[in-house]
Image: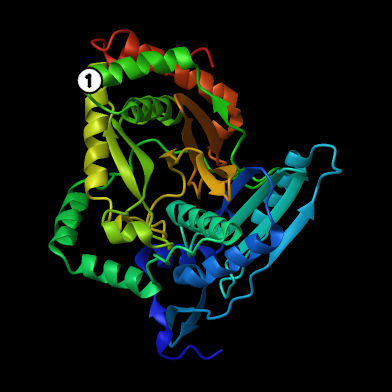
Amino acid sequence: MQHGDRALPLTRGQLDIWLAHETGRFGTEWQLGLFARIAGRVERGPLEWAIRRVVREAEPARVTFFQENGQVLQSPIDDPEVEIAFHDLRDSHDPAKAAFEIASTIQRTPMSLTGPLFKFAFFQTAPSEFYLFTCCHHIITDGSGVALVGNRIAAVYTAIVSGAPIPPPFFGSLQDLIKSELEYEASSDYVEDQAYWTENLPSEVGPHCRMPQSTGERDPYLPSAPVRLDPAVLRRVDALSKAWNIPRSSIITAASALLVRGWCDEGTESSEVVLDFPVSRRVLPESKTVPGMVAGIVPLVLKVEPGSAISEFCEHVDTRIREAVQHQRFPVQALERKTNDHGMGRPADRVSVNFIPSIFTLDFGGAAASASYTSSGVVGGFGFFFSGVGNELFLCTAGPGQPFSDFNVADWARRLERVLVGLVADPSRRLSSVDVVDGG
């Protein structure tokens, strides 16, 4: 294949994924999925036309990766093959479950980095019920990018079936993405972010998960079924977050850090707990229209001092989250790569805390659709994933890291609720008074 002058370099985030992919570090965990339930009639022909149209518009998603003269490059594919598998499941015993199982199989099927790096599947489960599944490799897009594509498909389809003009394309190009990253690396913001992270890198002497050998059983990186956290506990957390004027997520992150400290300390005397903290990196307005891979992960470095007050610790966690978000664009993995021997820029045995976007709605020509992510992204040792629907909050878990993987998601939901109750009961108490291990 001749790529000519259209070959472009990878962003730092893409290169990290490419290196991990080539060295066998993680596999299909890099593949993201968006699963949409459509309540109403959908015309298959116009939908397939809309999907192919949107793929042509989304240049960052229709690329191929290759090596040339020792450099890893990417180049757009002008006319990519867009396969849209159709499954009529109306005669299945449980059509919705069958659709989800097929989608899971698609997501667990490896994709070649030569492309295409996207797949679509369309399911009919009832006369007026359909499902649309979109699967993309993380090297070409992230959760926000997949959502952009899903919204655009719905908008184009709606225009077709209603006879209205198709809204003009708005996606940023691959060149826009590369240019934005290069401009950032040459900016004063980059220098400020670098200074912050240089001063706030993890010491790596804190607790870590134990990484077991593969057992050949169920893929440990597949997210668990979601478990709803107790609404009564969440109402108390919400009241405290309002009184303190900090987000609920900061208090939940504080509770998660205490769980990590309590279950992974292995006798360490360090007060440091480090969590992987996924960030969107979509700071600039133009980055919010690029259906490409922009997201990243930063280390959330927390000090857990048993003698400090609960209120002080929660404030500390909130401050660190705000700082991490303020400096989220910086490629922290590059700094970590210089200071450790893990090779991929960050330890593979950390626990991540990820607040993923809630279920969102789409409109397919008057048929209402609810879309949600079928994966939570690559985790290191273990991950706590929180997603909200209205006032409700759900917990999923994933990853092989022990001791966390020794228990199911319901166990961790119950433990997390107990820690949250301990935090909100009397915030003036010391952290050492919060029970994080007993009663498991």
Q: Residue 350 or 426: which is nearer the viewer?
A: 426
The residue positioned 51% from the left and 56% from the top of the image is: 155
SS at circle 1: helix
Occupied quadrant, residue 13 = bottom left
Q: Residue at x 31, y 41 (%)?
A: 300
The image shows residue 263, relative to residue 126, as above or below, that is above
Query: Residue drawn 52% across and 72% down?
Result: 56
Residue 409 quadrant: top right
In the picture as drawn, the residue positioned furthest to the front comes out as: 163
Q: Residue at x 56, y 46 (%)?
A: 375
Pick the front one: 327 or 380:
327
Say if 272 sits above or below 423 in the image.
Answer: below
Image position of 233 (left or right of 201): right
> Local crowd at mark 1 within 10 Å, few (<14), some, or many (≥20)?
few
Up-down relation of residue 214 to residue 247 (above or below): below
* Type of the residue with mark 1: Trp
Give coordinates of residue 367: x percent, y percent. 61, 44
In this view of the protein, which residue sits in the foreground, 195 or 127? 127
Relative to 22, is 332 above or below? above
Q: Position of residue 194 (x, y in %)?
A: 19, 57
Quarter of the image with the N terminus is bottom right
Q: Quadrant of the C terminus?
A: top right
Task: Determine which residue is flagged by label 1.
Answer: 244
Residue 187, percent from left and from top: 16, 65
Q: Which percent across, then down, holds residue 192?
A: 14, 55
Q: Is residue 278 toward the left or the right of residue 150 in the image? A: left
Query: Can you see residue 308?
Result: no
Q: Nearer the viewer, residue 35 or 307?
A: 35
Q: Count all numbered tags in the image, as a single digit.
A: 1
